[in-house]
Amino acid sequence: MINFEEELKKFHPSLEVEDAEEAIYNQDLTDMADLMVKIVKESKKTDSE
C-alpha cells in the first residue's frame, strides 16, 4: 500500500512549474471585463464630445 505522507515528503516541484507560475502572475493580462469597461468609457467619451 502507498504511504501518502512519505510520498509527500519526497515531493519537490519542478523549477519549470515555479518559473511558469511566476511568469503568469507577473503578466498584466486584459480579460473580457477589462475590454468591456474600456469600450464603455470610450463610448461615453465620444458621446459627450
Image: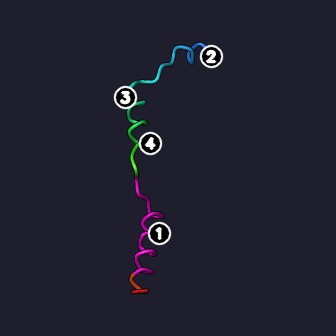
Please tell me which of labels 2 and 4 falls first in the chain.
2
User: 49 or 5: nearer the eye?
Assistant: 49
Q: Are marks 2 and 1 in contact (CB under 8 Å)?
A: no
Quick check: marks 2 and 3 in contact, CB under 8 Å?
no
Residue at x-position 45% and y-position 63%: 34
Mark 2 vs mark 3: which is more N-terminal? 2
Mark 4 Cα within 10 Å, few/some/many (few <14, many 20+)?
few
Vertical placement of residue 16 versus 49, above or below: above
Nearest to the eye among marks 3 and 4: give it.
4
Judging by the rendered image, the residue that carries numbered circle 2 is 5
Residue at image position (38%, 35%) is 20
Q: Mark 1: which secondary structure?
A: helix
Question: Hey, what amino acid is under mark 4?
Answer: Tyr
Near mark 3 (Cα within 10 A), the count class, few <14, some 14-19 or many ≥20, is: few
Picture residue at 56% right of the left edge, 14% below the top: 9
Q: Which mark is residue 25?
A: 4
Which is more toward the observer, 8 or 1? 8
Quick one: quadrant of the C terminus? bottom left
| Residue placed under numbered mark 3 in the picture | 16
- Which tag is nearer the camera, tag 3 or tag 1? 1
Residue 17 location (% of width, % of height): 41, 31
Segment colored magenta: 29-45
